[in-house]
């Protein structure tokens, strides 16, 4: 008889909840306002807060970032549900991938194909490397959005120094 460690039981339970109540998907967003991008989505919707608390405990144990919010319960016909529904979702790419790899051995139902397609997409579309910028003051390389200084101190030192062409004595 095989003995399953308690960690595997918790992850297998999470896989069962995702298989029954969850959604796994990668959606391409192209609205014409900016470059097309993808949204990674691992979502569980439920009215039982105890189930969602346990899901969050497992996510915290594996350092998976998630968000939880109250679902909009309106039907197109305007009917309001008597029980509020809550949503726990994982959207960050690395956390999405970690969660999928965690539950992959335990999925046996309808979500297994979605999981395999999502993992295949992540393999075929690696994360793009961020460009390196050079600080105008300390000349160190840094990543992030395109800016001229690596931090506030460099900007402040540059703005008061002789290197700044706009500095007035």
Image (cartoon, rainbow, N blue to C red):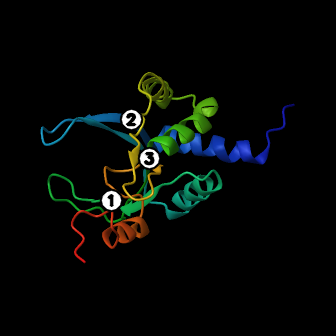
Vertical position of residue 11 compared to residue 74: above or below:
above
Q: Assess disc 2: are there few (<14), some (14-19) or many (≥20) residues with their C-alpha within 10 Å of its C-alpha.
A: some
Front-lying residue, 72 or 62:
62
Could you say where residue 111 lies in the image, as x and y percent from the top left? Answer: 47, 31
Q: Mark 3 and 2 residues: CB-CB less than 8 Å, in contact?
A: no
Indicate the secondary structure of the residue bearing disc 3: loop
Distance, label 3 to label 2, CA atoms, is: 13 Å
Question: Residue drawn 36% across and 55% down?
Answer: 136
- Could you tell which of marks 3 and 1 lies nearer the N-terminus? 1
- Could you tell which of marks 2 and 1 lies nearer the N-terminus? 2
Could you say where residue 57 lies in the image, as x and y percent from the top left? Answer: 61, 59
Q: Which residue is mark 1?
A: 71
Q: Which residue is mark 3?
A: 92
Vertical position of residue 51 compared to residue 32: above or below:
below
Is residue 86 toward the left or the right of residue 17 in the image? left
Q: Which residue is mark 2?
A: 25
Distance, label 2 to label 1, CA atoms, is: 18 Å
Is residue 159 toward the left or the right of residue 20 in the image? left
Front-lying residue, 139 or 76:
139
Picture quarter containing residue 21? Answer: top left
Question: Residue drawn 55% across and 41% down?
Answer: 99
Q: Mark 2 and 1 residues: CB-CB less than 8 Å, in contact?
A: no
The dot on residue 166 is: none
Indicate the secondary structure of the residue bearing disc 2: strand
């Amino acid at each position: 008889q095989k003995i399953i460690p308690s960690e595997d039981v918790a992850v297998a339970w999470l896989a069962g909840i995702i298989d029954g109540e969850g959604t796994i998907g990668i959606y391409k967003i192209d609205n014409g306002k900016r470059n097309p991008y993808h949204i990674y989505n691992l979502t569980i919707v439920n009215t039982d807060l105890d189930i969602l608390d346990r899901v969050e405990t497992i996510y915290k144990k594996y350092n998976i970032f998630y968000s939880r919010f109250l679902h909009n319960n309106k039907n197109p016909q305007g009917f309001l549900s008597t029980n509020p529904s809550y949503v726990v979702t994982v959207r960050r790419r690395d956390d999405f991938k970690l969660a999928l790899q965690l539950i992959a051995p335990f999925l046996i139902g309808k979500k297994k194909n979605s999981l395999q397609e999502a993992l295949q997409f992540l393999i075929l579309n690696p994360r793009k490397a961020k460009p390196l910028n050079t600080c105008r003051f300390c000349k160190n390389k840094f990543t992030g959005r395109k800016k001229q200084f690596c931090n506030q101190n460099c900007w402040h030192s540059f703005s008061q120094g002789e290197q700044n062409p706009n500095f007035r004595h």
